[in-house]
Amino acid sequence: MAIVEFRDYTWKYSRTKEPALKNINLKVEEGTFVGIIGPNGAGKTTLAYSINGLIPNQYYGVRQGAVYVLDKEVKQYRSDELTKLVGMVFSDPEAQFTAMTVEDELVFGMENLGMGVPEIRERLDWVVPLTKIGPLVEKPPYEVSGGQKARVALAAVLAMTPRIMVLDEPTSMLDPISRITLFEVLGELKHKQSNTIIVVEHSLEHLIPLADRMVLLYNGEIVLDDETEPFFEQMETILEHDAYPPEALRFFYEIGQKGYYQGPLPFTVEEAAQKLEALWQGGE
């Protein structure tokens, strides 16, 4: 079942000459983990905002076609209805903070959904350890580190248990260790929950191993849309459109093109190391 669907969708912001998205047709099946990639200006954030209703509700522009969430057009939802279904984590976590402590930040969204105290407490007991923010609950969310802010923002959305989670460049302000921690949390969600997760991301090293499917945007259009393994078999197209896979994956693709390697591409450094060792031993 497609939980999100774009049908012939075009969006042009006011005061711009060209549409940010052009004739987008895209289906996201429920329970899948989808990576949205592409260079700056490709339309990735516009795509994300079109799912959670920020477009057209908070941006001016010309909209053609339709976006459906659970078979209902986004424009037909009340904002509180859509918030229950689609949770959004922004590239700048501070943009969504409203409370003076991390715990109050987590509670705020749940109270707005009308949850009672026992349910709120139960969800806190679940989401705090999951996102590894236990030591932070009494601190102001504005004063913790960048990686901690990202996990707090994720926890605040997750606590409301939306069926769809959209993350817009969640690691753009993070150091390498914080990126790893954030994607570890997303991995936990993928393997233990049934959320549909859509991640807009530039840094692909940690996204690729989790993604069931990848979508490449370029100049507002979908260039590639496929399951992760066959997606990266189309490497030339990916590189031609200014998307840059991890070096290990690209290396194995290139030696495969020259006939030195046959088999699936490695999606992690560990897989690449194992395959390289096997190649080395086989060549001795």
Image (tube, helix red, strand yellow):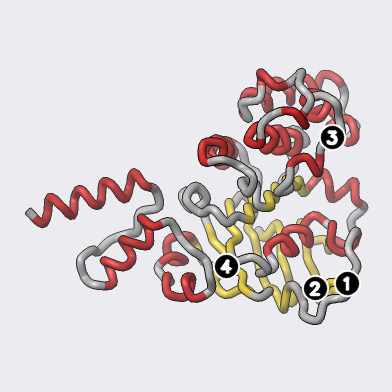
Q: Residue 7 location in percent, x, y?
A: 74, 73
For the residue labelled by badge 1, is the local secondary structure a helix, a strand or a loop?
Answer: strand
- The residue identified by callout 4 is 216
Image coordinates for residue 6, horizontal then vertical, percent: 72, 68
Residue at mark 1 = 61
- Say whether marks 3 and 2 touch (CB < 8 Å): no
Q: Are marks 4 and 3 in contact (CB under 8 Å)?
A: no
Helix, strand or loop under label 4:
strand
Mark earlier in primary sequence (2, 1): 2
Sequence-wise, which precedes: disc 1 or disc 3?
Answer: 1
Q: Quadrant of residue 105?
A: top right
Residue type indicated by callout 3: Gly
Give the camera-side residue of 196 and 239.
239
The residue to which callout 3 is attached is: 109
| Mark closer to the chain start, 4 or 1 | 1
Kind of residue at badge 4: Leu
